[in-house]
Image (cartoon, grey):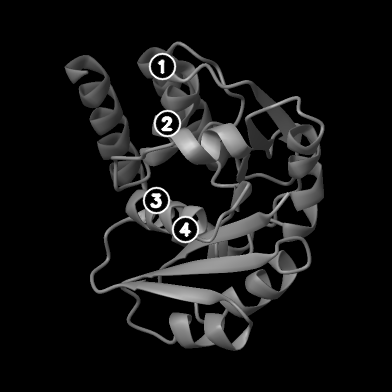
Amino acid sequence: MRVIAVIPAYNEETRIGSVVRAARTYAAEVIVVDDGSTDATGHKATEAGARVLRHMDNCGPGAATMTGIEAARLLQADVITTLDADEQHDAHDMPALLTPIERGEADVVFADRFALRNAIPLIRRFFNAIGNVVTLLATGRWVHDSQCGFKAFGPRAVKEIQLRMNGFEFCTEIVRESVQHRWRITQVPVKVLYSAYTLAKGQSFATGMKTAFKILLRSFLR
C-alpha cells in the first residue's frame, strides 16, 4: 500500500526537518502543510525532502490536516498517517499504527500515549481526560487518547473522511466521522516525547475550553 504522511506545521523551523526525515523512513512521501508560518518552516521541510503546501494565513491544525489529506488523495495514497511537527510523536512508531491497516483489521488507528509508562505531566492528563469526555458526549464513542494528532487512516477512511472544523476540535471530528461511517477502529500504544518546548506549544486552558464549546455546539447543531 502507498503510505503518505501528512504533517501540519506552524512555526516549527527548529523541529520540522527531523520529523520529516524520520517519517520518510516509513512513508512513500511526506506532505508538510505550512499553516501560515512566519519562520522558515516551509524551507526546512523542503530541505528535509517533504512536499510542502502553504496556507497564506494561519487557518488552524484541522484545516491544515484536511489540506494535507486532500493532497495525499491526489497523490493516490492508500494509507495516510498524520503526526505533529514538534517532535512530540516518534515517527518510528508509524509501523505499529500501520500494522492493523495492513492486516485489514482497522480503518482508523488511534495512537494512545497513555497506554505506556510515558512521562506525561498531570495537567496534560487532565486536559486529555476532559477532551475524551467531551468527545464521548459529542460522538457516543470512547477513545482513550482522542486528542492525539498521531493517527493512521486506511483506504476506506482515506476516501470518506471530510473534516470541516479548523481548530483543535478536528480530533473529535475524526472520532465522529468514524461513528458516522462505521469505520473499524483500534488503538495502539505509542511513545510521547514531552519537553518544555512541546508543552509550551500545546493548548492553553482557555483554548481548551473554546475547543470543548465548539465541539458540543457543533454536535447539537447537526
Q: Quadrant of residue 67?
A: bottom left
> Mark 1–mark 2 contact, CB under 8 Å?
yes
Q: Residue at x 32, y 82 (%)?
A: 38
Q: Which residue is mark 2?
A: 172
The Cα atoms of the two marked residues, 3 and 2, are separated by: 14 Å
Q: Quadrant of residue 40?
A: bottom left
Determine which residue is flagged by label 1: 139
Amino acid under disc 2: Thr
First reached walking from the N terminus: tag 3 or tag 2:
3
Secondary structure under tag 2 reads: helix
Q: Position of residue 203 (x, y in %)?
A: 40, 49
Which mark, by number, is residue 74? 4
Instruction: Quarter of the image for the C terminus: give it.
Output: top left
Does dot 3 land on a helix, a strand or a loop?
helix
- Closer to viewer: mark 4 or mark 3: 4
Q: Position of residue 170 (x, y in %)?
A: 38, 40
* Residue 85 higher or lower than 141, as above or below: below
In the image, what residue occupies the spot 75% across and 25% down? 105
Nearest to the eye among marks 4 and 2: give it: 4
Spatial separation of the CA atoms under disc 4 and disc 3: 12 Å
Q: Badge 1: how crowded within 10 Å, few (<14), some, or many (20+)?
A: many
Residue on which the image places disc 3 = 66
116 relative to 16 in the view: left or right: right
